Image (spheres, rainbow, N blue to C red):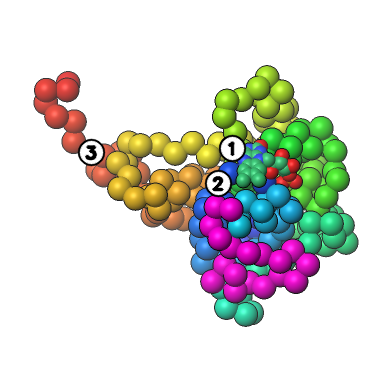
Amino acid sequence: MSAGGDFVLAMTGASGAPYAVALLRQLVGSGRRVHLTISPSGAQVLREEMGIDVSLSQFDHRVFGFPEGCAILYHHHADFSAGIASGSFRTAGMVVAPCSMSTLAAIAHGFTTNLISRAADVHLKERRKLILVPRETPLSLVHLENMAAVTRAGAIVLPAMPGWYHRPQTLDDVVQFIVARICDQLGLENTLVPRWGDGAEPRVEESNR
Ligand SMILES: Cc1cc2nc3c(=O)[nH]c(=O)nc-3n(C[C@H](O)[C@H](O)[C@H](O)COP(=O)(O)O)c2cc1C
């Protein structure tokens, strides 16, 4: 295990692949090992939204711009023999980003049909940090109840819901807002976006007071 513990990142088939790729960069940049797994729908969304053509059976780090030998340990979504499928394998936490409503439902009900829902189930049972980054709109009662269920079980629901108070200028600013919130939850130091209260907040015009 690398210093501070390994992270697990699962990408599933909700819209928002740029959040996942930016988070992967940040996690790898932290010097920790990252266990990466991607659902088939997650791969489809990566292709649709970013033109990233990832092969799930012959994964190559270079599709994300990382060199050979970087700290990404890839696991196929059907590989239940991966370390992260077991509670005895120690990690520093898991993020599912983006998290589809389907994967959210599987986690909420302990229905472990692939490595992603199994690893998430393991994080819940071991009382480790599990951060879900769901994206859907509008939300049905089923979605909301599943979010409540995972929250009761100990997960953190961190919707891909960027704030605007830091006045983002680019799409990357919007993406980094969510990545920063995830890193905060993982306890990873970051200065990705200015923090409210650190003197970086925009001045409120006198006439608006
Ligand atoms: C381009 C694209 C965008 C999608 N966006 C969403 C979404 O935002 N939220 C969601 O819950 N499902 C979305 N879906 C549907 C899921 O991918 C689908 O329910 C799938 O079964 C999820 O499987 P997974 O959880 O194993 O990745 C999208 C599918 C595609 C192809």
Residue 20: numbered disc: none
84 displayed left or right of 197: right
Please tell me in which quarter of the rendered image ligand 1 is found: top right
The answer to whether marks 3 and 1 mark residues whose Cβ atoms lie closer than 8 Å is no
* Disc 2, SS: loop
Q: Report the quarter where the N terminus lies.
A: bottom right
Name the kind of residue labelled 3 in the image.
Pro
2 or 1: tag closer to the N-terminus: 2
Q: Position of residue 158 (x, y in %)?
A: 56, 38
**Residue occupying the far right of the picture:** 81
Name the kind of residue labelled 2 in the image.
Gly
Q: Report the quarter where the C terminus lies.
A: top left
Residue 135: numbered disc: 1
| Residue 21 falls in image quadrant | bottom right
Q: CA distance from mark 2 to mark 3?
A: 27 Å
Whether residue 8 appears in this view of the structure is no
Name the kind of residue labelled 1 in the image.
Arg
Query: Mark 3 — residue?
Result: 202
| Nearer mark to the viewer, of 2 and 3 | 2
The magenta region covers 48-65
The answer to whether marks 2 and 1 mark residues whose Cβ atoms lie closer than 8 Å is yes
Query: Mark 2 — residue?
Result: 16
